[in-house]
Amino acid sequence: EMIRAYPTLPQTPISLMLHTSKEVVYPSILAVGSIIFNDDYHTQMMIDLQVIPSLLWLVDYPDKGVQGNAVWVLSNVAAGNELQIQAVIDSGVIPKVKGFMREYSSIEKSPLIEKRENKKKKVEKDRFHESLWLIVNVCMSGSSAQLQYLLNEHLLDALCDVLQQNKVLRHPVLTAVMEAFEKLIKQAVKNIEDGLPDILTPFLKRYNLKQLFDELDDL
């Protein structure tokens, strides 16, 4: 209620997210995220206060923990309505989080991961999961055009790669990723029915979905 009465109040944590000290940046991100987590009204209010450019800057911050927290806030925005999802897409963050997903998946394939410190592993895993949730939220609440954007950015391949490395996922994350994957498949099928370019056939030549789903059923 206080935020509704003083709509400029959140400008303080937004500005503090750009502070030079990481000790200030972290709690500021959490404060912003807790506001956005409330509902679409608060999310839009924060968008109007230009929170997304600040978050995008933090996605490139030289600290993976800060990056992961920034992606977490953006994933909360992406859980909103279509206009708010579009604001996330327009920010250009999708290719960045796709890169985070691929980076973590490739790390998991390497035995060197066992030699890393537990804290560093957790930070990388958290950033990976927040990136996944951002994509999942866009898939679950986005419009047909927004799903098409994800297809154009090769997120179908990226999600399939994640599912193939299913050891890095746990329920309910795995279930959510499978639902998002299904939404993109349906959009790709719709494209064929509408006479749009067929990206599904080449995709099916690159991946053995029957084997993938058999492995997932065994989990």
Image (tube, rainbow, N blue to C red):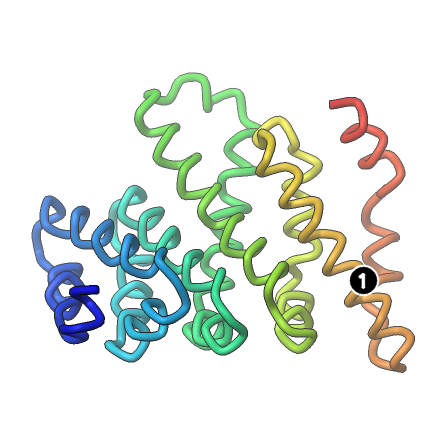
Q: Position of residue 42 (x, y in %)?
A: 32, 68
The image shows residue 92 at horizontal and vertical percentages of: 45, 71
Q: Is residue 147 left or right of residue 61?
A: right
Query: Which quadrant of the structure image shows residue 55?
Result: bottom left
Question: Which residue is at 17% across, 59% downward?
Answer: 17
Please say if 125 is above or below 64.
above
Q: Residue at x 84, y 80 (%)?
A: 196
Please give left or right for residue 133 compared with residue 9 in the image: right
Residue 132 in the image: above or below residue 191: above
Q: Give the residue number, with chain letter if any, for mark 1.
A: 186
Q: How many marks?
A: 1
Question: Please, what is the three-letter code of the amino acid marked with disc 1?
Answer: Lys
- Which quadrant would the N terminus be assigned to in this image? bottom left
Q: Residue at x 79, y 22 (%)?
A: 218
The residue positioned farthest toward the top in the image shown:
115
Residue drawn at x 45%, y 59% is 96
* Image position of 105 with respect to 120: above or below: below
Q: Looking at the picture, how far across and down is residue 57, in whole percent?
A: 27, 64
In the drawing, does residue 114 fall left or right of residue 65? right
Q: How far across and down, in percent of the image, does residue 156 sit?
A: 70, 56
Mark 1 closeness class: few <14, some 14–19, many ≥20 residues within 10 Å: few
Q: Give the secondary structure at mark 1.
A: helix
Position of residue 4 in the picture relative to residue 183 (left or right): left
Out of 86 and 3, give the one closest to the viewer: 3
On the rendered image, what quadrant is the C terminus found in? top right
**Residue 212 falls in which quadrant of the image?**
top right
